C-alpha cells in the first residue's frame, strides 16, 4: 500500500464503508483495520510509523522528508559552520528515516526521564521558593527586587510563600521544603563560646529592651533582707521596726542606681540548681539539690523532645542537653563565665574549665587555703555539651580576664556570668579562718567589679547587669526563698522598684528573648515572663530600638 501525503496518516479506505469482516462478517468502517468482533486484521500491515510521523511537518520540511534517501543530489548543501574546531562538512547523518528515528528516540527518553526524575506537583512551589531563598542569601547574588526577610509566612522577592527551612542541615542536604519549625542557628565567632555567624531563631515574645550585652552576677547565701533590708518585720502579732540592710554598697549606693525586683525568688533551696536554671532552664533533681557531692552522670536519662527537660537523677547532663551557651554559640554570639580563683589549684594546674573527674567525689566542693573556687558555683561544667567542647577552655575562665575583655567593645562577650569565690560571695561563714565573710566581703568585691562594667563601651551599648544570689542561707528549706535582684542598665530607672513575681527562669527567658533565642526548659513555660516594660522603664518604644 502506498502512502498518500494528502490524507491524514492511516485514514486511507481499505473497503466500502459497512462492508463485513472477511473472517467473521461483522460490519466495519472503511478505514478500520482490525475487527472488533474477532480481532483479525484487514489489509496489509500498517505503514511504517516513522514515515507517518513526518507527514504533519511544515510544508518546507514535508517535501524534503519524502525525498528518497538515495537522491543525494537533491539534498541542500549544509551551511558552513563558524566553528572551525568541528567542521560539519562531510559528516554523514544518515537518511531521513535514520534522522526521524533518532529524533523519536530522544523524545521518548526525555519523556521517561521527566516522569521518573521530575518533582512532584505538590512540592514544586515550595522547592522553587526555597531556591529563591537560597539565592537571596548567596553572596554576590542580584535581583531586580530585593528579597524580603523570611519570617513565618515568608515574603520572598515580594511574593508570599510558605515558611522555608533555611537551617544549616537543610542547606547542606539541598532540601528546601516548607518547615513548621523555626530554623535553628549554629556556628559563631570570637573568643569564649562562639563560632561562624548564623541567623538566630525568632521568639514569640518581644524583648522590652534592645539588650546587646548582659552580665549576671551571682552571690551565694544572702537573703533579700540581708541585702536590701525590710520595711517591717513581724514578731508574733506585732510589727517590729524596719530591718536595716546589711549591705551598704549593693543595698545602698547601687540600689539607688538601678531597679530592684522585690519579688525575685529562687527555684531551689540549694545553690547549684539555681545556677543551672540560669543557664539551661533545667529543673532541680535529687543530686543537684545536694550540690552534687559526687560528679555523677545521669542514669538512663530521658530528654523531653518538646521542652528539652532531662528527667532522672544525676549531675552531668547528657551531651544532647541544650544550654544558653549552646544557643549563643549557634547564634554567633560570644559568651563567657568569669570565676574567681578557678586557676588557683596548684595540684591540677588547670586555669580554666576546672571540674572533678566524672564519677568521682568533688574535691572542690568546699574552699581550700588560697583556693576559694567551688564546683557547684560553676553551672557550665555540669553540661557535657560544654565540657566536651573546646569552648569550655576558652569560655569558662578566671576572673582576671574580665577587665581586659571590657577594654574593647569587640572583645566583650554578649553574655557573661561573673561569680566570686567563697571569700567574696556573701556566704555567712568565712572561706578560711580569720578572713572577712558575709555581705561586707561581697560589697568590697562588688566595688571592684561593677564600676569596671558600667564604665565600659559595651555597657553603654545596650548593657544590663543583674545582681542576685543562688540561694538564701537563712532559708535552707525554702525552695522559693526571696532573693531579690538588682537590675542596672541604661534602660532601667534609677531607684526604681518592681514587685512583679520573677525567678531564675524569668532571667534566662529575658536573655533568650533579647538575643532572639528559643526559651529552654522551664523558661519556655507560658507562665514564665521575661522582664517587662516596668523593669526597662527607660527603654525606647517598640519600633525605635
Image (spheres, rainbow, N blue to C red):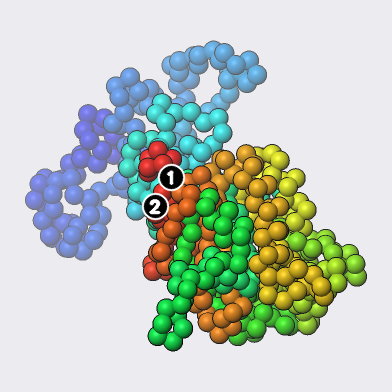
Rate crowding at label 2 as few (under 14), some (14 to 19) or many (20 or more) other CA atoms within 10 Å: some
- Tell me whether the residue at label 1 lies in contact with that at label 2, contact meaning CB atoms closer than 8 angstroms: yes
Above or below, comparing residue 496 to residue 82 in the picture: below
Q: Can you identify the residue that label 1 sits on? A: 539
Instruction: Tell me which residue sits at (10%, 46%) in the image.
Output: 17
Q: Position of residue 200 (x, y in %)?
A: 52, 50
Give me the disc on residue 533: 2
The answer to which quarter of the image holds residue 322 is bottom right
The residue located at (45%, 21%) in the rendering is 71
Which of these two is toward me, 302 or 460? 460
- How many numbered discs, if any? 2
Question: Quick check: 96 left or right of 11?
Answer: right
Give the Cα separation between the discs numbered 1 and 2. Answer: 8 Å
Residue 246, percent across and down?
60, 67
Which of pointers 1 and 2 lies earlier in the amino acid sequence?
2
Q: Quadrant of the N terminus?
A: top left
Residue 393 image point, x, y percent: 77, 59
Crowd class of label 1 (few under 14; some 14 to 19; many from 20; radius 10 Å): many
Residue most toward the right? 347
Q: In which quarter of the view is residue 274 placed? A: bottom right
Image coordinates of residue 400 in percent, x first then y, are: 78, 53
- In front here: 209 or 186? 209
Q: Secondary structure at mark 1?
A: loop
Amino acid at each position: 500500500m502506498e502512502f498518500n501525503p494528502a490524507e491524514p496518516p492511516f485514514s486511507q479506505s481499505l473497503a466500502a464503508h459497512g462492508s463485513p469482516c472477511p473472517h467473521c462478517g461483522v460490519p466495519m468502517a472503511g478505514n478500520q483495520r482490525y475487527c472488533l468482533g474477532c480481532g483479525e486484521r484487514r489489509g496489509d500491515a500498517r505503514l511504517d510509523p516513522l514515515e507517518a510521523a513526518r507527514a504533519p511537518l511544515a510544508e518546507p520540511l514535508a517535501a524534503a522528508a519524502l525525498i528518497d534517501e538515495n537522491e543525494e543530489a537533491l539534498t541542500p548543501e549544509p551551511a558552513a559552520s563558524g566553528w572551525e574546531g568541528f567542521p560539519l562538512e562531510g559528516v554523514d547523518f544518515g537518511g531521513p528515516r535514520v534522522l526521524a528515528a533518532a529524533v523519536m528516540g530522544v523524545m521518548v527518553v526525555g519523556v521517561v526521564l521527566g516522569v521518573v526524575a521530575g518533582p512532584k506537583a505538590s512540592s514544586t512551589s515550595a522547592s522553587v521558593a526555597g531556591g529563591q531563598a537560597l539565592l537571596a542569601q548567596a553572596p554576590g547574588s542580584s535581583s531586580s527586587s530585593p528579597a524580603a526577610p523570611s519570617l513565618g509566612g515568608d515574603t520572598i522577592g515580594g511574593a508570599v510563600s510558605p515558611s522555608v527551612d533555611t537551617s544549616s542541615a537543610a542547606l547542606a542536604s539541598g532540601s528546601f521544603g516548607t518547615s513548621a519549625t523555626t530554623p535553628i542557628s549554629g556556628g559563631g565567632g570570637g573568643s569564649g563560646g562562639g563560632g561562624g555567624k548564623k541567623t538566630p531563631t525568632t521568639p514569640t515574645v518581644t524583648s522590652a529592651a534592645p539588650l546587646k550585652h548582659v552580665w549576671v552576677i551571682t552571690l551565694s547565701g544572702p537573703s533579700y533582707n540581708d541585702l536590701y533590708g525590710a520595711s517591717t518585720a513581724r514578731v508574733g502579732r506585732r510589727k517590729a521596726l524596719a530591718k536595716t540592710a546589711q549591705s551598704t554598697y549593693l543595698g545602698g549606693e547601687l540600689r539607688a542606681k538601678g531597679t530592684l525586683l522585690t519579688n525575685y525568688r529562687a527555684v531551689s533551696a540549694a545553690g547549684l540548681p539555681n545556677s543551672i536554671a540560669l543557664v539551661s532552664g533545667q529543673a532541680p533533681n535529687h543530686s543537684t539539690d545536694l550540690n552534687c557531692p559526687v560528679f555523677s552522670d545521669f542514669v538512663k536519662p530521658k530528654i523531653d523532645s518538646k521542652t528539652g527537660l532531662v528527667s532522672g537523677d544525676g549531675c552531668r547532663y547528657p551531651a544532647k542537653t541544650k544550654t544558653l551557651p549552646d544557643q549563643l554559640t549557634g547564634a554567633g554570639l560570644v559568651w563567657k563565665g568569669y570565676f574567681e580563683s578557678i586557676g588557683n589549684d596548684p595540684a591540677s594546674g588547670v586555669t580554666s574549665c576546672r571540674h572533678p573527674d566524672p564519677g568521682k567525689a568533688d574535691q572542690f566542693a568546699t574552699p581550700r587555703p588560697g583556693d576559694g573556687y567551688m564546683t557547684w558555683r560553676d553551672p557550665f561544667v555540669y553540661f557535657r555539651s560544654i565540657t566536651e567542647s573546646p569552648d569550655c577552655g576558652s569560655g569558662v575562665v578566671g576572673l582576671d580576664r574580665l577587665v581586659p575583655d571590657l577594654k574593647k567593645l569587640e572583645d566583650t562577650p554578649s553574655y557573661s556570668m561573673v561569680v566570686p569565690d567563697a571569700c567574696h560571695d556573701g556566704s555567712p561563714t568565712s572561706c578560711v579562718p580569720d578572713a572577712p565573710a558575709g555581705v561586707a566581703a561581697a560589697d568590697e568585691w562588688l566595688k571592684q567589679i561593677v564600676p569596671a562594667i558600667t564604665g565600659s563601651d559595651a555597657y553603654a551599648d545596650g548593657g544590663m547587669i543583674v545582681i542576685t544570689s543562688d540561694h538564701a542561707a537563712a532559708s535552707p528549706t525554702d525552695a522559693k526563698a526571696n532573693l531579690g535582684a538588682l537590675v542596672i542598665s541604661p534602660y532601667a530607672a534609677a531607684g526604681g522598684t518592681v514587685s512583679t513575681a520573677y525567678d531564675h527562669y524569668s532571667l534566662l527567658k529575658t536573655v533568650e528573648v533579647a538575643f532572639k533565642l528559643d526559651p529552654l526548659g522551664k523558661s519556655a513555660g507560658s507562665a514564665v515572663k521575661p522582664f517587662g516594660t516596668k523593669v526597662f522603664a527607660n527603654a525606647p518604644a517598640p519600633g525605635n530600638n
